DNA sequence: CGTGTACTTGAGTGGGCTCAAGCAGGGTGG
DNA sequence: CCACCCTGCTTGAGCCCACTCAAGTACACG
């Protein structure tokens, strides 16, 4: 929206040097250690935002897709907080940060849109925190939840990430992911479909996944009150 | 800031019915299932934002403290996404959501401030995701990281939450939390201090905690390339 | 045809969970 | 003032899920 709406045309009219870029799958947009220099609007494709913790483990904190804005935090700070990597081929428009800041200042209506974008991202982060990362919920349940979030539209298709990526979202090892996915395939709930490098996906039995995702097998015993 | 800055005076001048409220420790501001009806500015105290996942487990997704705004998402949606509970006695000013929306519309400068607030919250959420919830990092390390985040200013004091609250942040059971805290106390890194219901805290050996928090004992073996 | 990357599979281990019981302290009411 | 409760915390024993390490397979690509 931000780029597709008013703002894009306005930006172009602004005579700013906008680069229209194509990143191929696996390419890095920028690194955690870089100074903020631009924001990117996603036109097409899937981007992962990752962080490396103190022990060097990779962790995916969010996905960005069509009409999302990458590196929005650089409006307020020069420290990038993530590394951004394309998961599929991605088309982006790059807006130098100084121009973007100026543009925001000149267009108050945009501020509310960006605020809303930010709230959306926050909502997704909260979702991940509450659904995807609890040790107290079995890994299989969390994986089912993640697969549902990766559903493509209303279809029976689900994005098929690399198993290490599945792992760095829900916080378990690739080996365990592999075992769980094979289990789901053995049960006929998941089937490999599509071809690399794009379109890699699963055909999924959505109702079955929803059933698994609501699993309450490990509900904590509450002390009885007589 | 939002409440302490321009906006508060402006709001008052606006003749809006602002309630100035005091919640005691443990009191609920609002529930996940309630319709959005207001935002709250925190003047003093600590608020936790919790969610209950499909299996009924409680999960803390964020803390809010002085100068933060609670229920900011209700600017855009009527669905509350969390339950908000006071952890200490808390002083809040309550602004009915219709007034707040109107006020935002009339005061563009506020939009940028709220956008920034939202980015701050997002940053904290990302931090939690990347540092606090990885199963692949030992629980003790994650607990040390959490304790450092709960540090009070630059002192050697750390907020002492209930063990179930510690648990619902990093995703482990209260029993394990208890064992780990006792371990830290046995090592002289942590000492109980302060009195209930407020001021409950630990005196901590901060450098020791930092050491533990950077632990790399479980770094994954990288396949050697000869 | 060889090399690298992604994934699979197996065996063994251990950290954190479950269930269960007991303790400590601060209210509250008799 | 004590008895009682209730909530928060502790401690123990046993188990199991997910981890570690290690080796092997599948497949894409030059």
Image (cartoon, coloured by chain):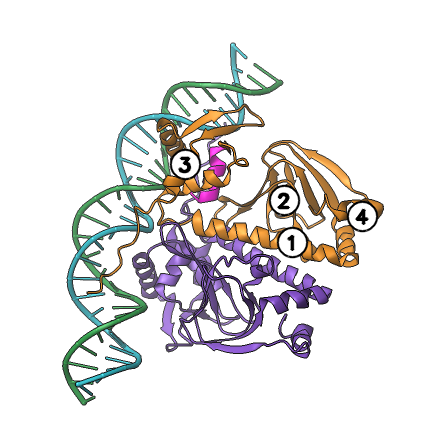
Chain colours: A orange, B purple, C cyan, D green
Q: Is residue A163 magenta?
A: yes
* Labels 4 and 2 positioned on one and the same chain: yes
Residue placed under numbered mark 3 in the picture: A207
Q: Is residue B83 above or below residue A195?
A: below
Q: Which mark is residue A200?
A: none
- Front label number (3 vs 2): 3
Q: Is residue B81 above or below residue C2?
A: below
Q: Is residue A7 magenta?
A: no
Q: Is residue B10 above or below residue B115?
A: below
Residue placed under numbered mark 1 in the picture: A73
Discs 3, 2 touching: Cβ within 8 Å? no
Task: State the separation of the CA atoms marked 1 and 3.
Answer: 37 Å
- Front label number (4 vs 3): 3
Depth order, front residue of B204/D15: D15
Give the mark, 3 or 2, whose residue is nearer the N terminus. 2
Badge 4 density bin: few <14, some 14–19, many ≥20, Cα 10 Å: some
Question: Residue B195 at x, y = what percent?
Answer: 37, 78
């Amino acid at each position: 929206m931000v780029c597709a709406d008013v703002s894009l045309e306005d930006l172009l009219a602004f005579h700013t040097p906008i680069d229209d870029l194509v990143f191929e799958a696996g390419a890095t947009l920028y690194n955690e250690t870089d100074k903020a220099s631009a924001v990117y609007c996603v036109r097409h494709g899937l981007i992962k935002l990752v962080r490396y913790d103190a022990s060097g483990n990779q962790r995916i904190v969010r996905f960005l897709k069509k009409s999302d804005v990458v590196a929005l935090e650089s409006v307020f700070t020069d420290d990038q907080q993530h590394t951004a990597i394309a998961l599929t081929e991605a088309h982006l428009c790059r807006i130098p940060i100084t121009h973007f800041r100026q543009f925001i200042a000149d267009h108050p209506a945009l501020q509310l849109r960006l605020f809303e974008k930010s709230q959306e991202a926050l909502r997704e982060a909260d979702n991940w925190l509450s659904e995807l990362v609890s040790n107290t919920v079995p890994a299989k349940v969390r994986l089912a939840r993640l697969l549902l979030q990766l559903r493509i539209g209303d279809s029976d298709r689900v994005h098929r990430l690399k198993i290490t990526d599945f792992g760095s979202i829900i916080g378990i090892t690739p080996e365990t992911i592999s075992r769980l996915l094979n289990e789901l395939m053995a049960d006929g709930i998941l089937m490999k479909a599509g071809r690399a490098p794009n379109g890699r996906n699963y055909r999924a039995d959505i109702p079955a996944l929803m059933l698994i995702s609501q699993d309450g097998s490990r509900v904590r015993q509450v002390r009885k009150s007589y």
